[in-house]
Image (spheres, rainbow, N blue to C red):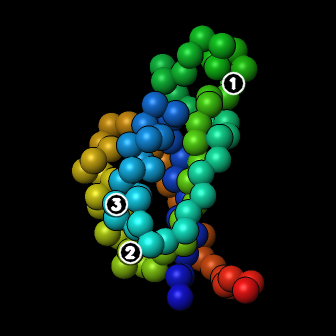
Amino acid sequence: MSNFCLVLVCPPEIEEKLLDTLLVIAGDEVFTSTPTFSHGTAHGDMASLEQVMGRARSVRVEILVTEEEMANLLETLRTSLAGTGLRYWALPLAAEGEIE
């Protein structure tokens, strides 16, 4: 059973690399990806229109993981996506399952 929902928010430019990494590392796990907007992004990392709007286009990925899987995944991402502005947080799960 997974213990956490790991949320990753990245710039669209690294979406494919992030998804490819997740498919290799956690290929058996179900995860989701959704276009979204992030707020609080450093202005230097935003396009002119994004600076005016105060939000940046981003991709949000959610994956259910154990504590050990999360540690391993984050270590891999720190190496392979260093300096890309990838943000993350983890939420403890109260329940999970599949309706069959």
Pick the residue in front: 25 or 48.
Answer: 25
Q: Which is more N-terminal, label 1 or label 2? A: 1
Residue tagged by mark 1? 54
Give the class, few, some or many, for how many residues have Cα within 10 Å of label 1's Cα (few <14, many ≥20): some
Where residue 94 appears, as percent x and y from the top left, is 68, 84
> Disc 3 on helix, strand or loop?
helix
Q: Nearer the viewer, mark 2 or mark 3?
A: 3
Distance (Cα) linking label 1 and label 3: 34 Å
Q: Are marks 1 and 3 in contact (CB under 8 Å)?
A: no
Who's the residue at 56% across and 16% down the image? 47
* The disc label shown at residue 69, or none: 2
Q: Is residue 62 above or below residue 34?
A: below
Q: Which quarter of the figure is the C terminus placed in?
A: bottom right
Q: Height in image: 1 above or below 20?
A: below
Q: Position of residue 77 (x, y in %)?
A: 33, 53
Disc assigned to residue 24? 3
